[in-house]
Amino acid sequence: MLGKIKARIKELDIELPEPSNPGGSYVPYHISGSLLFLTGQLCHWNGDRLFTGKLGAEFDTNEGSKAASICALNLLSQVDKALDGDLDRVVKIIRLAGYVNSTPDFHGQSQVMNGASELFIEVFGEKGKHTRLAVGVSSLPYNVAVEVEGVVEISPA
């Protein structure tokens, strides 16, 4: 039987990618008390990089928002893995931080991050509303356009 959040994901016709493995000497998530800290997730789908390049050069704000929503799907996949498939344990999405690979004259980082924020609100409703950071950076791993990390409050198993 599907939990409420998994049923909502199905209702929204959202597919989750496979959780990625770390590309270095770190873990994809860490649980400390009631907080789940999530490593930054890139805009890739099952290992395929989808958005490589800079916002303000190769991509516009709308494309960047799509890249951020893919990062959010990867985060959600890691949450699902960390909670052994029980997304109903999510109490609250606390914070998202987004890093946007952008040209010096691009100023739409906040609009780009709306792609990630809106996905969490769509899936979790009020519990999906969070604080947020959106910054422009000069480069990201593998030249991806966006990377998003998060902190989630969870209930005990």
Image (tube, rainbow, N blue to C red):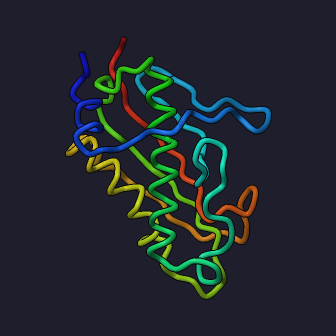
For the C terminus, the quadrant is: top left
| Residue at the image point whose x is 52% and y is 34% from the top | 37
Q: Is residue 137 above or below residue 106?
A: above
Q: Residue furthest top?
A: 157
Residue in the foreground of this view, choosing between 2 and 138? 2
Q: Is residue 128 above or below residue 142?
A: above
Q: Is residue 33 left or right of residue 103?
A: left
| Residue at the image point whose x is 57% and y is 83% from the top | 106
Q: Position of residue 116 (x, y in %)?
A: 42, 56
Q: Position of residue 47 (x, y in %)?
A: 66, 44
Dividing the picture into quadrants, the one containing residue 16 is: top left
Q: Position of residue 120 (x, y in %)?
A: 34, 47
Count of numbered tags = 0
Q: Is residue 25 left or right of residue 121?
A: right
Q: Is residue 143 above or below residue 130?
A: below
For the N terminus, the quadrant is: top left
Q: Residue furthest right?
A: 25
Q: Position of residue 98 (x, y in %)?
A: 53, 58
| Residue at the image point whose x is 50% and y is 24% from the top | 81
| Residue at the image point whose x is 67% and y is 61% from the top | 144
Q: Is residue 74 left or right of residue 94?
A: right
